[in-house]
Amino acid sequence: MSESLPILYSSARSPHCFKVSLVLHELGVDFDRVEVDLRAKEQKTPAFLALNPLGQVPVYRDDAGVHIDSLVIMRHLDARRGPSRLFPHDEVALEEVLRWIDVSSTAMRDVSHQLYWQLIEPPGGGPDPQIVAQGRQEGMELLATVESALSRGDGWMTGTFGAGDLSVFAWLYGFRRFDLPTSWEAFPHLRTWLDRVSARPSFAASYGRVGRPFDRGGRAANRASQQ
Ligand SMILES: N[C@@H](CCC(=O)N[C@@H](CS)C(=O)NCC(=O)O)C(=O)O
């Protein structure tokens, strides 16, 4: 690890970190990464709490200081690269991008967490079919809003490629683990958009280096695929 490079403290399991990594690579920032083991509660150690008293990843450290929260970090990075590239200057356009980022960090995250703890790491008694069905329905409704947004523009979430796409992508990419969408028939734009974003070099650089937050693993995966 180089002394002088910025550091992203992140977890391979975290879509919030995945999204920041996508932005770093899109902007061409050279950085080092420190893996924080969330299962081992490394985020709650005194050393980490000194960086982020909230005990969460991502945290980004550069010559300007320590930056906490994925949205704050993304905006800091974008502002530092000169003319804004991933967040628009126009206030109305910016509001739309921020709205989608908020949807991804709340509703999409909630569906993702709900289904993850039912299907990928199920509770002792196995998945609760009612919770799974409700999560899948909410997931399908969210996918429909994304499909509708994509069908209005030029194939990007907000008209121009940027932080809105990367943030929504970071959460939706993992939905396939939950067999969402249940059918692609009603989602042609979503399918093309997922392919377009995952074809970008930032995806390969992030998915390989920041980890594989959406891999199914071993026993849990087998159980999930039997749903
Ligand atoms: N608002 C924060 C949320 C960060 C967050 O929820 N991070 C999760 C990983 S995705 C975390 O660190 N969880 C561990 C914990 O809360 O102990 C952001 O956008 O960065």
Image (cartoon, rainbow, N blue to C red):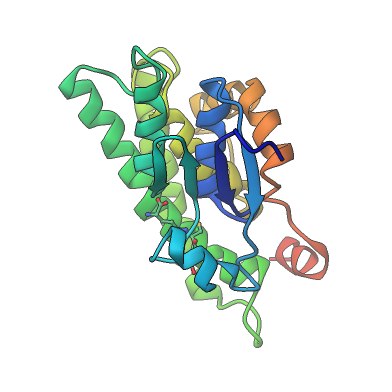
Residue 182 appearing in the image: no
Q: Nearer the viewer, residue 123 or 213?
A: 213
Residue at image position (68%, 36%) is 2
Against 64, residue 43 (above or below) is below
As drawn, the residue found furthest toward the right would be 218
> On the rendered structure, is 129 left or right of 72?
right
> Horizontal and vertical percent for residue 6?
55, 36
* Number of marks present in the image shown: 0
- Residue 194, picture quadrant: top right
Tell me: residue 156, above or below residue 99.
above
Q: As drawn, is 51 to the left or to the right of 181?
A: left
Instruction: Give how far across and how far down residue 51 sits, in percent.
Output: 45, 58
- On screen, residue 93 above or below 225: above
Q: Position of residue 97 (x, y in %)?
A: 30, 30
For the C terminus, the image quarter is bottom right
Ligand 1 quadrant assignment: bottom left
In the image, what residue occupies the spot 24% across and 26% down? 94
The x, y position of residue 73, in whole percent, is: 40, 39
Residue most extreme to the front: 3
| Quarter occupied by the N terminus | top right
**Residue 11 in sight in this render:** yes
Q: Residue at x 54, y 73 (%)?
A: 45
Judging depth in this view, the residue of 152 and 124 nearest the camera is: 124
- Name the residue furthest bottom: 125
